[in-house]
Amino acid sequence: MADFAQTAGSAPTLAHPSTFAPVAGIGFPVGTPVYTSSAGVAGKAAATLVGGAAFCTGLARSQGIVTERFLAQYADVLELTAAEWDAVAGTAGGLTPGAPYYLSDTPGQITGVSPVVKAPIGTAISATELLIQITFPLNA
Amino acid sequence: MADHNTPAGPGVKAHPSTFSPVAAFDYPVGTPVAIDDDGGLAGPANAANEPTCVGLARTRGVTGERTITQYGDVLQLTAAEWNTVGTGAGGLLDGLAYYLSETPGQITATPPVTAQSWVVPLGIAVSNTELLILLGIGTLVPIG
C-alpha cells in the first residue's frame, strides 16, 4: 500500500497535500508521470494499452531512486523549473501556457500532442506550472 | 507566473484549490477561465476554441489585476451569479453535469455537439448554488 503523505526518505523534501509516497521501481527525474505496476512499485507511465502504464497516478515531485520512496503528486499545481519540464516534455523553455498535456508514447514523458491512447495529464498555467488534471485514458 | 493563493484584493479569502492569474479581460464570478499561450493571462474559456479550462473565477476578473481561479472542491455562488454564466434564473440544476459552453465564459448542461468543438467537463451541481468542480481535458466533437 502506498504510504500517503509521507516525505520521500531522509532528504528534506516537503510533502504536499495532494501527494503520496510510493516506492520507485526505476530511476526517473522530477516531473515524470508515474503509474503503479503489478509489482506494486512505481514505474514510468506511457500512452500504451499494455500493462496499465496509461493509468497515471501522478507526477514525480521528487526524484525517483530505485527502491526508495518518492513523492508523487496527483492534483493541484506542480511547479518545476523550465529545464525540469523540458526534460520530461521535450520542450524548450518550459511548458506552453494554456496548452493541454497528455501521456506520451515514450515512457516517463508528457506531450502536447496526444498519441492514439489519449491520457490527459493537465494544463499548463505558465511555463513552469502544470495544473494536474489526470483522468483515465479516454480510449482504453 | 501564477501567484498561488494570493487573494485578489483586501478581504478576499483565498482557497486551497485556487491560483491567481492576471485577467486579460473583465468577467464575472463563476466564469470558466482559460490561460492564453502568449502572456499567460486569464480570460473566458470557450469550447469552440480550446480543450482546456483551468478553473472558475472565484473573484471577479478585472483587466490587469489578479483574480482567484478555483480548480477543485466546491464553488458556491448565488443562483443569480450562476445565472450570469449561463445556467438559467434558478441557478444550477441538482445532479447535472456542467460543461464548457461554445459561448465564451459560459457553462452549459448540454455538451457541445458542433463538429470540431470540445466537450470539456467542468463539474457536477450538488445544489442550485454549488458546483463540485471536476475539470477534465476536452474531447473533440468529431466531424459527421
Image (cartoon, rainbow, N blue to C red):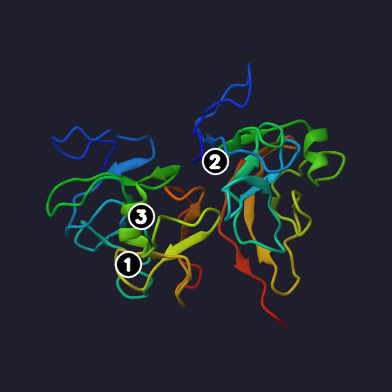
- Considering every residue shown, the one lying at the far right of the view is B89
Q: Nearer the viewer, mark 1 or mark 3?
A: 3
Numbered circle sitting on residue A85: 3
Q: Is residue B113 left or right of residue B89?
A: left
* Residue drawn at (85%, 44%) of the image: B88
In the picture of the structure, the residue carrying the numbered disc 2 is B72
Q: Measure how far apart labels 2 and 1 are at the Cα level.
A: 26 Å
Q: Position of residue B59 (x, y in %)?
A: 67, 31
Q: Amino acid at mark 1?
A: Ala
Q: Image quadrant for the C terminus of chain B?
A: bottom right
Q: Amino acid at mark 2?
A: Gly
Q: Position of residue B27 (x, y in %)?
A: 75, 40
Could you tell me which chain the residue with mark 3 belongs to? Answer: A
Numbered circle sitting on residue A53: 1
* Residue drawn at (32%, 75%) of the image: A50
Looking at the picture, tell me which residue is in the foreground, A77 or A53: A77
Q: Amino acid at mark 3?
A: Trp
